[in-house]
Amino acid sequence: MNDVAGIRVICAFIDDIYKIAGMLASQDDITVLQVKDYIQFPKKNGYRSYHMIVEIPVFFSDETLPMRVEVQIRTIAMDFWASLEHQMKYKQDIEGAEKIVARLAQIADQINRTDVEMQDIREQIQQRN
């Protein structure tokens, strides 16, 4: 771990994730060091989110130092899934974990389909206005 802070940004829609990531990357005082797009390339367990390691200036009384920050950007639905998966995964060691991991991955896929449907509905509404 080489970042000094972390921030999670929760969005309503998938395309908002990429907009926010783009806005961060375009800031002249932010340097993007690493990106992991778990939305396009989900983890085996179904985890989806967009991670960035960025370097930002931190101002002290006598100097300014670049510091690394992890930014996680995800939808409300992705955050819901990740929070519950994390709670269940780390609270206990249970028998039949492989089946549970498979079920969690299926649920993550369902949540992703819901995210995509919601975005499609928003786009349809926006086109009519």
Image (cartoon, rainbow, N blue to C red):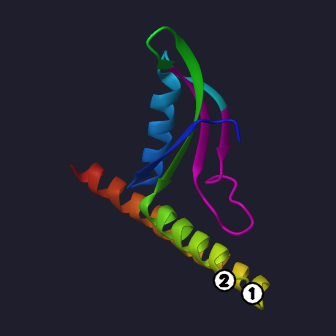
Residue 96 position, x and y percent, is 77, 90
Secondary structure under tag 2 reads helix
- Magenta range is 34-57
Q: CA distance from mark 2 to mark 1?
A: 6 Å
62 vs 102, nearest the viewer: 62
The residue most toward the front is 61
Q: Quadrant of residue 65?
A: top right
Q: Are marks 2 and 1 in contact (CB under 8 Å)?
A: yes
What residue is pinned by disc 2?
A: 103
Residue at x 45%, y 30% (from the top left corner): 23
Q: Quadrant of residue 87?
A: bottom right
What residue is pinned by disc 1?
A: 99
For residue 109, the mark is: none
Give left or right: position of 29 versus 86: left
Residue at x 51%, y 63% (from the top left corner): 78
Residue 1 position, x and y percent, is 71, 42
The residue most toward the top is 62
